[in-house]
């Protein structure tokens, strides 16, 4: 019995190691694609009560429908999302990841579903651009492109990392930091929703193209996704969603 258990455990471990990303055909045969996101990055992916929603959640639903698939969603910490792709724990990640060289070494990005960038937000209207960050404490979410780009501003006093973007925002509101760097549409939505708080939107620190990702080298799934995304971009459904969320078209040009 003991031996049996040991063998079973060893086999399970091997299976985990040898797990291969599912190809487009395999996913199609199953009829269901497993997609991971964070769920804490409104208006892109967030919970409305217990319902996962947001612009890119809705874009993914449109794309999956074109692919003839239904989505099973998983939500977890931003930091764990791309790592899980490498372990083949889900087929695709959509969580506002900017396409960076570093990430592209570890995963395969699809075509972008929107274009945006990191914006400087402060409570003090004097802090507007990178130069104004000199000697300041800046909040960013761990594992993001904001972190990388704030790090490049060598004159800052300190960068503080937070597990979620909302925590970084709270740090700004409670004056534990001088500035917060997040997505420009996130910033816009928050400033609009909370006019009394006094968020001051500054300049963009950098721009980026945002895309979904699949396991490194999973070309069939990436191209299946890209084909369906192109259809959604062309048939007006993307435009309607973008209008609903942002009152403008956020696609990359
Ligand atoms: N666009 C930024 C990046 O590429 C932030 C993404 C944050 N996404 C999230 N779901 N919290 O890192």
Image: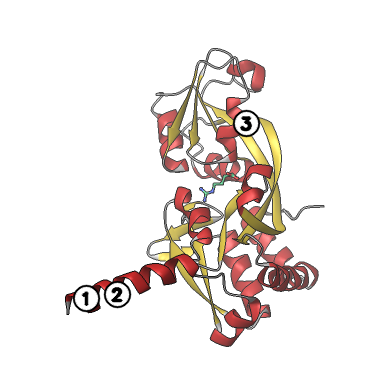
Q: Between tags 3 and 2, which lies in front?
A: 2
Quick check: can you spot residue 49? yes
Q: Where is 241 relative to 4, above or below?
A: above
Instruction: Give how far apart the Cα atoms at labels 3 and 2 are.
Output: 48 Å
Q: Between tags 1 and 3, which lies in front?
A: 1
Looking at marks 1 and 3 on the same chain, the residue that comes earlier in the sequence is marked by 1
Q: Helix or strand or loop: what does disc 1 sit on? A: helix
Along the line of sight, which residue is nearer the eye, 217 or 62? 217
Q: Helix or strand or loop: what does disc 3 sit on? A: helix
Single out the residue that lies furthest toward the bottom: 29
Looking at marks 3 and 2 on the same chain, the residue that comes earlier in the sequence is marked by 2
Quadrant location, the N terminus: bottom left
Q: Do the residues labelled 1 and 2 touch (CB within 8 Å)?
A: yes
Along the line of sight, which residue is nearer the eye, 11 or 164? 11
Dividing the picture into quadrants, the one containing residue 151 is top right
Along the line of sight, which residue is nearer the eye, 103 or 78? 103
Q: State the residue position of label 2.
A: 7
Q: State the residue position of label 3.
A: 149
The residue at the point 54 percent across, 60 percent down is 54
């Amino acid at each position: 019995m003991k031996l049996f258990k040991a063998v079973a455990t060893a086999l399970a471990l091997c299976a985990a190691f040898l797990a291969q990303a599912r190809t487009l055909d395999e996913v199609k045969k199953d009829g269901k694609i497993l997609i991971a996101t964070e769920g804490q990055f409104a208006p892109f992916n967030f919970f409305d009560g217990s319902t996962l929603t947001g612009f890119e959640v809705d874009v993914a639903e449109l794309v999956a429908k074109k692919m003839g698939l239904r989505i099973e969603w998983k939500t977890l910490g931003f930091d764990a999302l791309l790592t899980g792709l490498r372990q083949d724990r889900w087929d695709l990640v959509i969580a506002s990841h900017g396409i960076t060289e570093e990430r592209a070494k570890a995963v395969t990005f699809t075509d972008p579903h929107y274009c945006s960038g990191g914006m400087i937000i402060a409570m003090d209207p004097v802090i507007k651009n990178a130069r104004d960050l000199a000697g300041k404490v800046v909040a960013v979410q761990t594992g993001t492109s904001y972190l990388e780009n704030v790090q490049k501003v060598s004159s800052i006093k300190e960068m503080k990392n937070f597990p979620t973007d909302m925590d970084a925002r709270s740090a700004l509101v409670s004056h534990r930091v001088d500035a917060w760097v997040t997505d420009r549409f996130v910033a816009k939505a928050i400033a609009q929703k909370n006019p009394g708080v006094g968020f001051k939107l500054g300049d963009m620190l950098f721009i980026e193209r945002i895309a979904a990702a699949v396991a490194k080298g999973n070309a069939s799934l990436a191209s299946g996704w890209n084909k369906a995304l192109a259809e959604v971009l062309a048939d007006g459904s993307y435009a309607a969603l973008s209008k609903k969320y942002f009152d403008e078209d956020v696609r990359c040009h």
